[in-house]
Image (cartoon, rainbow, N blue to C red):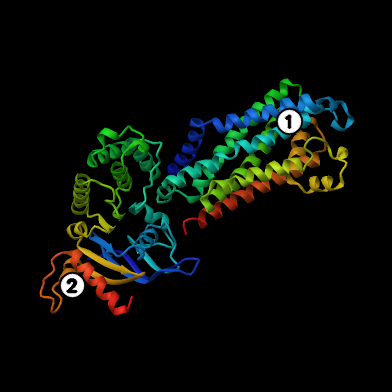
Amino acid sequence: MRSGNLLIVKRAVTGLLKNPWGFISGLGMSLFFLAVYSAGIGGIGFLPQFENGGYTAFILPLIIISLSIGSTGSAGQALNRDIQSGYFYRLYLTPVLRITFVAAPVMADMISMAVGTSIILIIGFFLKVPFAFGFLSFAGVVILAMLLAVALSGISAGLTVLTENLQAAQITGVVVFSMMFLSTTFLPFDMITSSWMKMTARINPLTYILEGMRFLLAGSSYIYFISGFMISLLLALISLVFAYNCTRKSLM
Amino acid sequence: MESIITVSELTKRYRDGTEALKKISLDIPHGSRFVLLGPNGAGKTTLVRILSTLSKETSGDVLIGGEKKNQSASLIRKKIGVALQSLTLAPEATPLELLVFQGGLFGIAESKAGEKALSLINRFGLEKFRDKKIRNLSGGNKRRIHIALALVHDPSILFLDEPTVGMDPEGRYGFWSEMKRLNTEKQMTLFMTTQYLEEAQKNSDIMAVILDGEIVFSGKVSDFISLNSGKEGSGNSLLTLEEGYLNFIEEIRQRSGL
């Protein structure tokens, strides 16, 4: 029943193309953050803590993570629409693999995130972000962003299916938004003065994803890239397993 | 006649402890028109959801079209068509789009699914609405599309949970004619639940009555009517399923003190 699974994926991607407003507003908000942060605190980019990349290379990963909040809610919304209309049950009655109904909108969110991240990186290129490893930096950041999208979108989709309530799924965005500010968001480790904030940043998985992207863009420590990649991969896998289990448990 | 649905000792217990189905056993022959009757909350929809692979049973065995439900749910889904009580439609699609898409989900090639969709649109009298968004259609027309969707892949068993709710008399007549055609021409087994007992009497040959999660009668419709007509001393001879059913339920409730 491969064609059925492909149709579900196609429907999810087409749904996103037909209703791109979530993506557009998410991207718009991220670009607004980029403009405001660069203009407001970009002047400290000359400090040695920002190494060779300058402040734009430092802040760009944060802009990408903020994009993930806006770009990964579509899966939950699409599933919620199908659940509310009852169409989700119709889909369940077909021989298509049940995981596909959750994985397809997650995949659509992942594609949307890849497109948004590419746009932000192209803008970064024109803002003289160094891209320490050339095209590999570009591809690496996009991959990290896609993994992050799967992690967030999968949890959101799983919660929507499990609770049949979109509000429950929106918790993901709130959690990521809070975690974003408990990290090396605006300043590197060395410049964070509060010890509790330093500690929180160290245990915050987003820190490693942020720093991983910073390594790719500005060539900081590669340790962060490895841990950032491993963490985002692990989160994506956990999220997919969670979504799968939610699908199995739903409609019991 | 060979059984197409066999249910043995089926129990469904919800997490809160409610026992919706209590060791139900049923045998439905291939090509029959079976109707499940019972008051609201008796367990009819729960049984349909379990047999149609939407819900899991707590215990018991279900065999559909020769496949064990707990081992081959996906194979069973290819053999059955389901029209649940609540509508299951994508409101932003048109009937034609949705029917073609539904065919695709069952692995039917687009051109063939298109032909099948058009034939169903004609049979269900939806020609005028085929390219209109479903959300703009009347309840009765939505119900027709809902049922047509269950037929795209030519199932051998059709589950219909309260299928004619919201349909006008003309729509009902057309619907039952189509069901009769599918049953006689294609030997499609029909498993229905309804509260319209006149329709049940006209359009089914075997039946069961479920009460508080238990099957309290199972057999031929004609046998049920004769068994429950002309109660001793009452002096009247009941002729309809509705009268017989009401009499039967009342008697059972009196007997069990409910």
- Element at label 1: helix
Using residue B46 as the reference point, say whether residue A145 is left or right of it. right
Q: Are marks 2 and 1 in contact (CB under 8 Å)?
A: no
Choose between A51 and A80: the one closer to the eye.
A80
Residue beneath disc 1: A60
Choose between B168 and A173: the one closer to the eye.
B168
In the rendering, at what x and y percent does residue A199 appear?
83, 48
Using residue B62 as the reference point, say whether residue B252 is left or right of it. left
Q: Residue at the spot x=67%, y=27% of the render? A: A31
The tag on residue A68 is none
* Number of the front mark, 2 or 1: 2
Q: Is residue A92 above or below residue B226?
A: above
Density class for disc 2 (Cα within 10 Å; few <14, some 14-19, many ≥20) is many
Residue beneath disc 2: B228
Residue kind at label 2, given as amino acid type: Asn
Write down the quadrant of residue A144 in the picture: top right
Q: Is residue A192 visible?
A: yes
Q: Is residue A53 visible?
A: no
Residue kind at label 1, given as amino acid type: Leu
**Chain bearing mark 2:** B
Distance in Å between CA atoms under marks 2 and 1: 79 Å
- Element at label 2: loop
Choose between A159 and A122: the one closer to the eye.
A159
In the rendering, at what x and y percent does residue A210 appear?
75, 38
In the rendering, at what x and y percent does residue A53 appear?
81, 28
Which residue lies most toward the top here? A126
Count every numbered label the image shows and give the total. 2
Density class for disc 1 (Cα within 10 Å; few <14, some 14-19, many ≥20) is many
